[in-house]
Image (spheres, rainbow, N blue to C red):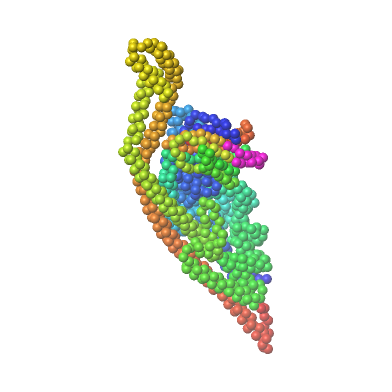
Amino acid sequence: MLAYGQSDLSEVETSKLVKTDLQDKYYRQALFYYFQNNPAKALAQVEQSKAKLTDLDSRSALFEAGLQLSAGLLQPAKQTLINFDSLLEKERVAAEQANLTDDNDEYIEKHQKRAVKANELRLIALLSLTNQYLAQGDITQAKDTLARITSISALYYPEYLVLNQLAYWPQQNHNLLAKPEDSVDESSPYIQLNNALRLIELAQADTAQYDVAIAALQKIKITPWHDEESNFWKTLFIDDGKITSSEEQHKIAKLQGQAIQDYARLLLAQIYISQQQYDLAFIELKTFPSESPYKESALFLFAFASQQVEQYNIAFNLLNLLYKNYPYSPLGWQSAELMAQQVSEQQSLAQGVSAYQTIESFFLQRQKDLNDFALAFNQSDNLLTFSMADEVVAGEGNSTQYLPQSVWLQQALLDVDLASLYQGLTDIDEQTARLELLTDKTAWLAEIIVLNQTRKVKIVVSKKLRDEQGTFTLLLNERDRLAALLNKQLADEEITAFANDDERDWLVRIENSHNALNAIGDQRNTEEYKERLARVEGALTWQLAQQYPQRAWSHSKQLQQLNKAIADVTAQQKSIDKLSNNQDAIELSIQKHKKSEVQLNSLLSKLAQLRANISAKIRQKVNAYIADQKVILADHVLTTRQGMAKVLERMAQVDKRMEMTLAPTSNQPTTEAY
Amino acid sequence: MKKINGVKNFTALISALLLAISFSSIAEESAMSSSENKSNTELALELEQLKSQVLKLNRELFILEEDLLFPASTQLAVFVSVDTGKFFAIDSVEVKINDKEVAGFLYTERQRKALEQGGIQKLYLGNLKMGEYQLTAIFTGLDPEGRTVKRAASYDFEKDDEALMIELKVVDNTNSYRSQVVVEEWVL
């Protein structure tokens, strides 16, 4: 039913009744939250819709899968996608039946459009799911999901190829789907980079592959890369449900393009260094952007190449910069050693010793830092509050991310598994917070149930009282009596039936007069009285006859109104009967409530257990990382001391030579100065 | 100037470091020990299952709450949707039933855009006894020139013992270059 309104509130129209497409309405309710960047609430809305509608249509199911992916619910999403074909088939059959039995063109067209689009959407979803499995390091599931893709369009082929490369690395997928005829030659930079990486690996055995890799990387580094435009579904599945403005998207695309080029340059430099073409590596890295995400690695390579092409000043400055700017990085540590070595070889032995001493104290300080970190970390009760950064960015409805202040932990979190475990811990806390809210809700619902029970008891008592008094039955009987009387009077067309009180008085008086005249009989002359009485009676009869139709209609109307009032009361009575007899509904609510309480407690306990398990796993991994770093640092301390010892040894040799030179019998010259 | 000595196997170290960067890192995960990976996967799976259960419980409690607070026999829900918002940028809405204000909402930019992109907002959920009622909705917003305008609609309806859903749609009329409010009662 539709009504149109304007500012004057006057225009109202109605149209024929068509059953509302509730699937669409519920889907759009979820969209309202999704477009506010609140995928968690959108997913809750979809779940509620699913409970009300029993089943979701293909579009809503796909939307649900996308939201599940962004919430990290990979298995349910995969299940939805696996069942998607049967859902589509069901809709196709329904649309065909509608075509046969119904002329609702809009309905058929809608279903046809959905079916056409559905396969593409499923493909996007499967690609995204693979991506998520790869991000989690679950290669088996990633391969299994890729195997579910049975056809691929040219538009998505590059992405499909990259995911296959990653899932099957370093091998290749032998069951790869054929490239669509209309697809562009492997234009994706990621495919080309992965190909170059594979060539570099092959070059370990066959150095000729380096030339091919160099040619490929030269091409990548000069090609400007543009991010392709995302539609709604690609945004939902591939961008983790994050809604970003076009400006932000443009900025991200620009950064990605630059990062691809930078990475290609870095790989090129690495190849040149491995081929001992240090001059080419030096030239390649000389103009490397300072804001690149790969600047640390590039700086190190550049410093090394500079040393090799005898650009010692550049090398010294870079190594100095590296170890000071990246004091917790293995590259920084390597740089420190290289720097001390360069000083002792390029400058003087005394300066070399001094540099080594500085570096030694630098490493000792790092060891102390690491020990302090290890102690604090192992003493922390809650891993998520340990070394927490001041600002944690999290959007409404989006999952938060743990950002530690500790550089050691930041470095450790570069490990995908550890990062994933920390994310798991954050998710558990979020779920626990949700459950606590639900606990409050169950307490509130318990109060509502008690109120409903009290209300119901009152209704039942009141109903029982009314039933005992028989008020409603008496009313019904009276109505039936009046209706019967009215019907009879209407059938007899008795004009005096609807006389008012005055008229009834007059009728009584006339009747009395008739009786009086009959009693007098012939004893007196009553002709004049009889005539007058007849006139009065005639006038009254005429008046009653005139009023009869109007009064009959009025009484019928009153009876109708009474009938309606009784019908309303009957409906209300039925509703009360339903409510008072509906013990099952309240019992069901109580059961559901009790079940929810049990589930809540069980879930809270399971989450606490899982949190403990994950925390233990994190501690194990971080301690393994700490142990590794300790070994590396101890190694650096050792090599630094060995380097220093060598320099001191050379100094001793120089001293000895000088002693011999200064001795009157010796004429040997010194070749090395302090 | 002397050439640096003693950096043996340095190139190999650099290669190892570089290959560990970014793109290949995912691929290298496959080389990790299977037992460690399996354990992590198991934990992830367990967490995923618990998340699903929390979601399911949330859904069940929502339905229980709705059944208890807004039973179908008395339930009235009012929704708001916007066509494209080309001629009317929605700013607020006020809804009255029989001249009594039951719901009001001030929209943020993001909420407005969510509506313009096809979202439907559940504005009000309440209870009404059986009978005849009049709903009045007054929308305030900006026209394309930035002037504040109001659009309103009134709708007479009868509440029976079934749930009643009413959608207030702000629809653009390309003929009159203005928007209008269309009231749709959902046929369940």
Is any part of residue A566 visible from this angle? yes
The percent coordinates of residue A87 (x first, y second) are 44, 39
Apparent side of residue A568 relative to residue A193 in the rendered image (left or right): left
Residue drawn 49% across the image and 34% down it? B157
Q: Measured along the vertical axis of the image, is residue A588 above or below residue A494?
A: below
Q: What is the magenta range? A: B140-152
**Observer-nearest residue: A673 or A96?**
A96
Q: Residue furthest bottom?
A: A664
Tell me which secondary structure the magenta stretch mostly adopts: strand
Q: How many marks?
A: 0
Residue drawn 34% across the image and 38% down it? A466
**Observer-nearest residue: A294 or B140?**
B140
The quarter in which the C terminus of chain B is drawn is top left
Q: Is residue A58 magenta?
A: no
Is any part of residue A208 visible from this angle? no
Apparent side of residue A475 relative to residue A386 in the rendered image (left or right): left
The percent coordinates of residue A313 (x first, y second) are 68, 68
The quarter in which the N terminus of chain B is drawn is bottom right
**Observer-nearest residue: A113 or B176?**
B176
The percent coordinates of residue B57 (x first, y second) are 42, 49
Residue drawn 40% across the image and 29% down it? A563
The percent coordinates of residue B117 (x first, y second) are 56, 41
**Observer-nearest residue: A563 or A139?**
A563
Residue drawn 65% across the image and 41% down it? B147
Q: Residue furthest left?
A: A468
Q: Measured along the vertical axis of the image, is residue A339 above or below residue A29?
A: below
